[in-house]
Amino acid sequence: MIATLAAAHPGAALALAAAHGRAPGAGIELAPVMTSTAGPASAEPESPGPAAPAAPAPEEPSGPGVTVRETAEAARANLTSVLTLVKGGQLKCSATSQRPSEITVQMIADVLAGGDFYEDEPIAAFAWPLLLQSGGLALLDGTKMRPTTRGRTVLAEQDPAALDAALAGLWTRWLTKAPIDELMRIEAIRGQRIPATLTAPTKRRAAVAAGLAALPAEGWIPVDRLLRIVRNQEPALIVPRSEAALWRLYLEDPEFGSLGHPGFGNWDILEGRYALCVVFEYAATLGLLDIAYQHPDDARDDFRDNWGVEDYRYLSRYDGLLAVRRTALGTTVFNPVADDLPVLGP
């Protein structure tokens, strides 16, 4: 992101990179580690090193207000439940943006196994219509969702392996065909619609997917470690298209709240929040990751030095994510082996 500036003005690029917690050159982001009320993030790098005794897997998060969701079985049930609503012609999305209507989101929330992750913040209920459309299991007929032939095939399935194959396919297709840019779900970050401001969503999704592929196969991963792993993978996760574009993004006020000001647009504010959205709203919804979380209110304080956020309880609805753990399907999807990858028949 800073490569062009570095070529012409190396000193200026280094200064800007330091101010924003962004590394110049190869595009790898090395911002200060994201912190949360769940505890300080480790400063140890996620890079190969000498073999060491295996540390015990982190225990399942617990405590007041903490919810743990094992997602695999629920994802299978939810896939069938939402497709049933689609078949009944009950769900509607915008014909232009493909985003679900508020009524549609509520109808989906009502049939989700265990309900949505939060009662007051739609996450899975918002994601399902987008996943079904990008995955080729549903399409829009005007504003009504209709099942495709493939969607009807999945709806008739009872075999868990076949449903897992469908869920895996939804993730794979969503990475390249998602109808919206997920960053738009972080409504507090404004200026996103200004032309030439954001990098391509497909590249950002690929970067997060690379981070998920690098997660340990077993045990709970605290969210700060998850973000550090994502940050240190290639391809690099970068949100603003350039340093100039970073100035166009803002909280509250385009001048005083611009993320171009030193410290206002650090990796945790932009890239970190984007990664949380992908993990919470899509990977967990599809049963690829079990999650532990709390309500987002006051869960993270990394944005408190930004201008105009005195009344904010959180920056994004995903701020309450505390830890993740791969499911069996997640391990298969993130690190596919030809003989193990589930396949849904024609």
Image: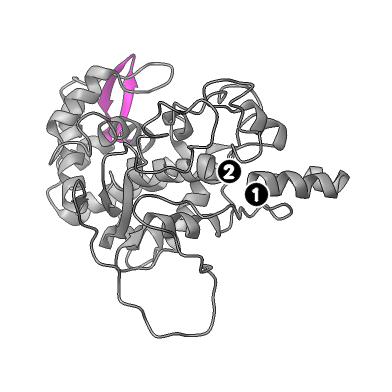
- Which residue is pictured at 34% across the width and 53% down the height? 38
Residue 176: x and y in percent read 48, 41
Q: Residues within 10 Å of mark 2 (few under 14, many from 20)?
A: many
Q: Nearer the viewer, residue 255 or 128?
A: 255
Q: Where, by quadrant of the figure, is residue 125 drawn?
A: top left
Q: Nearer the viewer, residue 69 or 66?
A: 66
In the rendered structure, the answer to whether residue 126 lies left or right of residue 338 reads left
Work out whether 199 lies above or below 43: above
Q: Amino acid at mark 2?
A: Asn
Residue 128: x and y in percent read 28, 34
- Which residue is pictured at 70% across the width and 47% down the height? 17
Work out whether mark 2 precedes mark 1 in sequence or the reverse, and give the earlier one: 1
Look at the image and tell me whether residue 341 can be seen: no
Residue 344: x and y in percent read 28, 51
Q: Nearer the viewer, residue 265 or 290?
A: 265
Asked if the residue at tag 1 contacts the one at tag 2, i.e. Cβ–Cβ closer than 8 Å, the answer is: yes
The residue most toward the right is 8
**Which residue is label 2 attached to?**
266
Q: Secondary structure at mark 1?
A: loop
- Which residue is pictured at 45% across the width and 29% down the height? 180
**Which residue is label 1 attached to?**
22
- Which residue is pictured at 39% across the width and 85% down the height? 53
Look at the image and tell me whether residue 340 can be seen: yes
Q: Verify whether residue 61 appears in magenta.
A: no
Give the spatial CA distance, label 2 vs label 1.
7 Å
Residue 264: x and y in percent read 59, 37
Q: Verify whether residue 137 appears in magenta.
A: yes
Work out whether 210 lies above or below 346: below
Q: Amino acid at mark 1?
A: Arg
Q: Residues within 10 Å of mark 1 (few under 14, many from 20)?
A: many
Q: Quadrant of the N terminus?
A: top right
Q: Which residues are magenta?
A: 136-149
